[in-house]
Amino acid sequence: MDTKTIQTARDALKSAPNGVYAQKVVPKEPVKQFYSNSNTGVADVFEQSANEGYQALFMPELALARIGSQDLWQNWYVTPSVRATGQTKAGAKVVVYAHVPNYLSNPANIRNTIKEGTLKNGAGAIPQDQFDALVSQNGNGRVFVIDYDTLRKSSSEVISVDSALEHPQTIPFLGSEATAKLYLQRHKEVYGKNIGIWHQDDFDKKTPRGRVLFLGGIGYDGLGGVSSLGVLGGLGGGRVLGVAPEAQSVEKNSVPATLESKVELLHNGKALRHEGKTYILAPEGLEL
């Protein structure tokens, strides 16, 4: 992966919330792609990236990384961001786009819904209290609640990039109007005048249901809100872009903890933390 792609991905991660399922493991590379073509591919890649110490980018951060890199337009990706459909406590039917840790960003929950055979057209059931918790975050800049009928009546197809900003899915899907404008312009430069915007009716009167969001791969590299959590389809399994958090602990096994053997690197190696104290490293060539 080229240097520019690595930097844009790492810059994008700075604006993302911490993933609650990340493991405390030191990644070997700053950015890494994880891919699985099994019928549990989405759960596989979420789990693999976390187990190796990487954080899978949420959709707004993936969009920003793509905007700044040519390399990331060569593949489709799945994110922990979710599109969930259900009914609020007040009885309103809504669709929630959430770019925060959620019930379906936990690979164990995805595996359970597949194992129990409770997927419906590829969408997984979400506990009502988990759905309500997402709805309550509406307006925080990471969660967007829109009217169910508004989305249901909108197109799910290939449309003109020039009209895509007005589609009710576009801004919630990409995380902000500013990001959406930049992304659509970049998409037009890479793929041309059309883009696919995909969604489907997931309302279930018995339980809220959701899908994680895909970017690219279906019809003109579209905004994918229709892919299954657990069966092979047009996208085939799962692929995430995993990014190592900026500060990582570096440890040497079976060696006493010293300044040389156990430090926390900060700001791309420009500073370090040891035993609770932060040290700013002197620029190369400075005589002390």
Image (cartoon, rainbow, N blue to C red):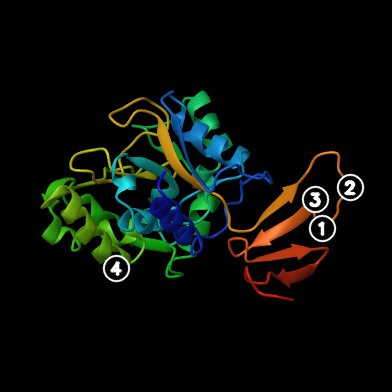
Does dot 4 land on a helix, a strand or a loop? helix
* Viewer-nearest of discs 1 and 4: 1
CA–CA distance between discs 2 and 1?
A: 10 Å
Does dot 2 land on a helix, a strand or a loop? loop
Q: Which residue is mark 1?
A: 259
CA–CA distance between discs 4 and 3?
A: 45 Å
Q: Are the residues tagged 3 and 1 within 8 Å (C-beta)?
A: yes
Say which residue appears at 26% left-offset and 58% top-offset.
Answer: 170
Q: Which residue is mark 4?
A: 177
Q: Earlier in the sequence, mark 4 or mark 2?
A: 4
Q: Earlier in the sequence, mark 2 or mark 3?
A: 2
Q: Which residue is mark 3?
A: 261
User: Could you tell me the amino acid type at mark 3?
Assistant: Ser
CA–CA distance between discs 1 and 4?
A: 46 Å
Residue 153 x/y as whole percent: 18, 52
Residue 185 x/y as whole percent: 20, 61
Quadrant in the picture for the N terminus: top left
User: Could you tell me the amino acid type at mark 4?
Assistant: Glu
Is residue 259 visible in the rendered structure shown here? Answer: yes
Q: Earlier in the sequence, mark 4 or mark 3?
A: 4
CA–CA distance between discs 3 and 1?
A: 6 Å
Q: Earlier in the sequence, mark 1 or mark 4?
A: 4
Disc number for residue 256: 2
User: Could you tell me the amino acid type at mark 1?
Assistant: Leu
Graded by Cα atoms within 10 Å as few (under 14), some (14 to 19) or many (20 or more), the crowding at tag 4 reads few
* Viewer-nearest of discs 4 and 2: 2
Q: Are the residues tagged 2 and 3 within 8 Å (C-beta)?
A: yes
Does dot 3 land on a helix, a strand or a loop? loop
Graded by Cα atoms within 10 Å as few (under 14), some (14 to 19) or many (20 or more), the crowding at tag 1 reads few
Q: Are the residues tagged 2 and 1 within 8 Å (C-beta)?
A: no
Q: Nearer the viewer, residue 206 or 52?
A: 52
